[in-house]
Every structure is written in structure tokens, then in C-alpha cells.
Image (spheres, grey):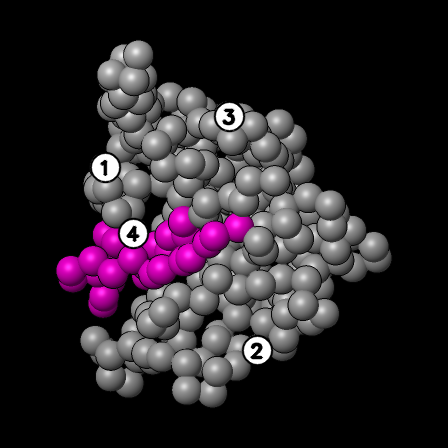
Amino acid sequence: MQSLRLIVAVLVCVLSPAACLADEFRILAWNVESNRPNAPQVSDPGVISAQLSELLQAPATRAQIVALSEVEPKTVVAYKQAVAEGLGTEVDFVTSASGGYQDTDTLLLIVDSTRFAIEDVFELHRFQGISANFTVTDPASGDFGAVRARSPLVAKLRDKAGQHSFWLIVNHLARGEENLRTDQARALGQWAEAHASEPVIAAGDFNFDYDFKAQKGNAACDAMMEGGVWLWLKPDPLVDSNWTDDRDNPGTDRYPGSILDFVFVANGAKSWKGEADVIVREGDFPDSDKTSDHRPIIATFEPSRE
């Protein structure tokens, strides 16, 4: 009988490796850098797709949840297919509507549908009187009342392996609008606090300009950390996650010791075993007009059993 049980256990591990790793899963978050209309090319979706598929095929960077930012709507299908090919499985996905101003800059969440089910999804435009977006009126283009920035994309995921649910928030907070970025961070904190009974994970490009030497970010970073609602899964060591070419000294990163991409946990997710790292690949920086100016970040979680 024991021999039969051992054979069954081995078969389970071979056919479903995830079952032998408790409830462990990974999230890969990446700003893939979109192209702007009537501007020079800064990335090639074909190249990004190939890199994304390659990352997901490698055991160390294989993730069942992929959160992408700066996604052009026309590239959604290509990135979805890249994830499916990389994982070798069926996937489900959802995109944001905001951030689509000039069709360049949406958020995209893709999950391994054999492991996770998307049970609910919405965009956090405003919460408890705090605005997480704004509208524009552009007479030149006839674009009146368009939602300009990227509202956080909130999804409730059910883990089919562990039979539990949690919230995942995909983010790309405002870059050029400091006040909006700070309000977005405050709204995230208020929302997570209002859902204190449920685990919450937030991942993506937060534009917090966290400086390694000063060990401090900008005002939005301070707002995110107010009240201890969020816990940053801080990479060790810290690694620069974004390349900004110095105009006066091309080929040199203007901000070599800073990080823009983060993974945070709140509520019950704080008790999970979790860690995050910036993925560094040979030749990734400086980026080219075909590759992203951001490095992917990957987080590994093992939810606690209660």
C-alpha cells in the first residue's frame, strides 16, 4: 500500500509540479514600454513578446500571473499568445479601459487559467473621495472628457490549487502628474484598508523614484507607506529597474541607483511567505528601440494555510 501511495505521489508531481510546491505561485510584473503616435519607435512588440515567452519558459522566472503596463491595445493579443506559449497552457486575461488615451498605454493582466480564475475585475478611478484619475478636454483632437491616466486595475483571483481568493492590483501610477500619483497611492491604501479581511497584492510600475542611497522615495511613496497598510517586498539586493538615458552623456543612466517597480502586500498577504526580485538579463540595459526601458520584477508567494 505504501508503495502504491509513493507511486501516486510521484505521478502527481510529474503531472502537476505545482501540487508538490504547496500553493506556491509567482507574479511577473513588467512595464513593456509602449510606442507613442507620431514619435520615434522605442520598443518592438515582437521582440517583447519573444522575451516574455522566454522568461516564462525558464524555471527561475516562470510565473502563473503576468501583470503588464504600457500596453498598446493592438498588442494585447500578441502578449496574451506569448504568455500562453511560454507557459504551455491556456490563459485568461483582462485589460484596462483607462490609460487608452491615444491608444498607447493600458494595463494587461494575464493568468494561467488552469491555476487561477478571474472572479471579479474593475478599475479604481476614485475611492472615498480620493481621485485616482482625471479627465482631459482636448479641443484639437475632439477628445472631450477622456480618462487620461491609468487607474489601478483591480482583480479578484481564485487560486484553484489552494482554494482561496485574493485581490491583485495592477498598477502604473502617473509619471508626470505628481499630485495625481500621490492621490493614487492614497486611494490604494484606503481601498486595501477597507478590505482588511482579504489578502491584497499590488504590483507594477509605481514611479516612486526610490533612491538607494537616501533610502527614500517621492511623496507618493510616502503616501503609499502611510499607516503601515502596505508592506513592500523589498528586493535584496536592490537593483535599478529603469533605464533613463542621460541627454548630456548618452549611454549613461541618469538615475542608476533608483527603482520604479514594486510589489506590495496588505492584510492577510503580509503573513504569506513572499519575496521579490528584479530580473536582470545580459544586455538588457541600456535598452534599444526594440526593448523595454524597464526590467521585469518577479515575486514568489507561498500563502499561509489557516
Name the residue type under label 1: Gln
Q: According to the image, label 4 marks what residue?
A: 43
Q: According to the image, label 1 marks what residue?
A: 57
Q: Where, by quadrant of the figure, is residue 7 drawn?
A: top left
Tell us which disc is closer to us: 1 or 4. Answer: 1
Name the residue type under label 2: Asn
Residue situated in front as seen by the camera: 240 or 44: 240
Quarter of the rendering occupied by the N terminus: top left
Q: Secondary structure at mark 4?
A: loop
Query: Do tag 3 and tag 4 residues touch (Cβ < 8 Å)?
Result: no
279 magenta-colored: yes
Query: Do tag 2 and tag 3 residues touch (Cβ < 8 Å)?
Result: no
Q: According to the image, label 2 marks what residue?
A: 218
Q: Secondary structure at mark 1?
A: helix
Q: According to the image, label 3 marks what residue?
A: 160
Q: Earlier in the sequence, mark 3 or mark 4?
A: 4
Q: Which residues are magenta?
A: 272-300
